[in-house]
Amino acid sequence: MADLDDIRDGDNFGLNTPADTTSFYLKGMNSMSWGIKNRMSRIFNRDSGRTVMLAFDHGFLMGPTSGLERIDLNIAPLAEEADCLMGCRGMIRTSIPADNTKPICLRTDSGTTILTEMNHNVLIAEEDAISMNASAMAAMLAIGDAATEASTIANFSRLVDLGNKYGIPVMGVTAVGKDMARDARYFGLASRVCAENGASIVKTYYTEGFENVVAACPVPVVIAGGKKLPELEALELAHNAIQCGAAGVDMGRNVFQSDKPLAMLRAVKEVVHNGAKPSEAIEIYHAG
């Protein structure tokens, strides 16, 4: 039983000692099954070891929010530039062409919307994820939310069981409640809980001290883009995260709500895969 009076902040993250990747190029994957490794290699570029995921799962909470009014018109034309597409089964089936060869990270939990109390989610049927040829499955964990923390962790653990059974990686998505502090201590805890419960990928938010969040998480960490930022700021966000050891980004609004979504996606890729500085990548955006 954890003693709440003696939880000490970690202070030895081994920042100068990289994780062992002798058996596979992504950290934490040495002992994973062939199927999980194969699917992870579809998502993460084998040269850079990173990924640019395009998230468009917002609609299951927000409906036709700006930039997602028509997935077939707003998202499908971007698919070839993304390394991986993250969306819900209905939008993928109806609006992403079936000849798309980009890997799919399928949002595998569903429940409430912004109109009601959030985070009361359940998992979709495992057969649906398999039938959609998902390269990864994603579910949210509401760490620190007294009403839904236990149920979302239970959902996630169940999803990891299914992922291990069928060789499909699972991405833990850390939700941030209105009462949660957006700092490295919180995101470090939430990310570690995802990994402790079997995540192959963790999606969380960038913050000061993010190098400690990444170091303490034994599997690849990608950052959420969050709310729409000016393009240069979004590129700086991606650059800072990569410099702290992030394995990529899973951006949505900062791409599809941009004035030039395709150019913005290309600029983000230049930062993530080629190490471009934001001042260099913004020129790609402007040229687009």
Image (cartoon, rainbow, N blue to C red):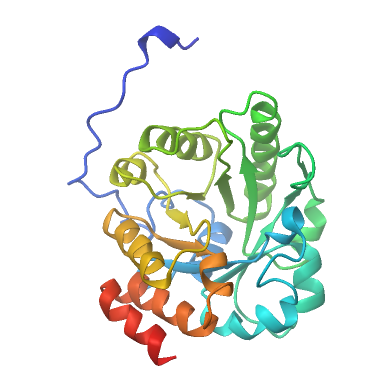
Q: Is residue 193 left or right of residue 122?
A: left
Q: Residue at x 31, y 54 (%)?
A: 245
Q: Does residue 252 appear in the picture of this structure?
A: no
In the figure, 217 relative to 225: above or below?
above
List x then y, in percent, for residue 265: 48, 78
- The residue depicted at 37 percent of the width and 46 percent of the height is 207
Quarter of image, res 95: bottom right
Position of residue 73 relative to residue 117, above or below, is below
**Image coords of residue 164 (percent x, y):** 62, 47
Seen at 31% across and 64% down, the residue is 239
Looking at the image, how many numbered discs can be counted on the residues?
0
Task: Residue 190 in the image: state x and y as whole percent.
Answer: 49, 36
Residue 226: x %, y % from top left:
52, 56
Between 251 and 12, the one nearer to me in the picture: 251
Question: Could you say which is closer to the camera, residue 43 or residue 66?
Answer: 66
Left-right relation of 141 to 279: right
Q: Residue furthest left?
A: 16
Can residue 127 be seen here? The reply is yes
Q: Where's the C terminus, which quadrant? A: bottom left
* Closer-to-camera residue (125/244): 244
The part of the image, by quadrant, that contains residue 156 is: top right
In terms of depth relative to the viewer, which is nearer, 230 or 214?
230
Q: Which residue is at the far bottom?
A: 287
